[in-house]
Image (cartoon, rainbow, N blue to C red):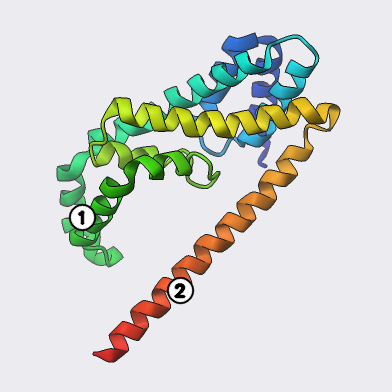
Amino acid sequence: MSGFLTGLVSSLQDLVLTGGYLGVFAAAFLENFFPPIPSEVIFPLVGFTAATGLINLLGVTFAGTAGAVAGAVFWYLLGALLGRANLKVYVDRWGKYLRIKFSDIEKADRWFSRYEGPAVFFGRLIPLVRTFISVPAGFVGMGLPRFIAYTFAGSFLWIGFLTLGGFWLGERWEQIAVWVDTYQTVVLSLLIAGVVILVLRLLKVIKKF
């Protein structure tokens, strides 16, 4: 991590140690508001703190989940604010340089509209996309109550895993970050493999013509 990010993470760790439930809420909000902050170095420490008896494990899990949802709603509103019309103007003007057509975006919209609930839920479990999955949710007009429900469920599961891991591991809570790094590497590898397979299939279709 960069010096700035390391200092920020250290400050957030101090915040959850001294700020109680409100500190956990604030740290979770900032972690979602500023995605480079790794949740795996925040919430296992929260779980370890709960193991000392200073705070309640379930209480901090709910506080962290509430903060995560608040941060996700920010990105949801940003996606809703941009809207289809603004994006179409941008793509029509600059899309040719990026080889992007608005019709491609409309196809992606239809896919997200079909799977929006599961996409938000499972997206909250993937470190690479857990924050920005909120943007297309706002963009396609997913109902805010439904978005919050799926975001809460996914965030509670993710934060619960991290805090419970820190609770069980105790002073070895930093081991969670190693596990998450491995998990992230596996997910990224699967995504890359999926893209490669998709490209190969597309090339096969093109050759037929």
Tell me the element at label 2. helix
**35 relative to 102, above or below:** above
- Disc 2 residue type? Ile
Give the label on residue 197, or none.
Answer: 2
Near mark 2 (Cα within 10 A), the count class, few <14, some 14-19 or many ≥20, is few
| N-term-proximal mark, 1 vs 2 | 1
In percent of the image, x 45 and y 27: which residue is there?
A: 152
Proximity of marks 1 and 2: CB atoms separated by less than 8 Å:
no
**191 relative to 90, above or below:** below
**14 relative to 4, above or below:** above
Percent across and percent down for residue 188 are: 56, 57
Percent across and percent down for residue 87 are: 21, 47
Percent across and percent down for residue 93 are: 17, 57
> Is the N terminus in the top left, top right, bottom left or bottom right quadrant?
top right
> Is the C terminus in the top left, top right, bottom left or bottom right quadrant?
bottom left
* Residue 42 visible in the current orientation: no
Tell me the element at label 1. helix
In percent of the image, x 53 and y 45: which residue is there?
A: 126
In percent of the image, x 20 and y 39: which residue is there?
A: 83
Residue 98 falls in image quadrant: bottom left
Q: Nearer the viewer, mark 1 or mark 2?
A: 2
Number of on-image labels: 2
The one of 58 and 141 positioned closer to us in this rendering = 58
The one of 176 and 102 positioned closer to us in this rendering = 176
Mark 1–mark 2 Cα distance, whole angstroms, equals: 22 Å
The one of 89 and 165 positioned closer to us in this rendering = 165
Give the label on residue 98, or none.
Answer: none
Give the label on residue 106, or none.
Answer: 1
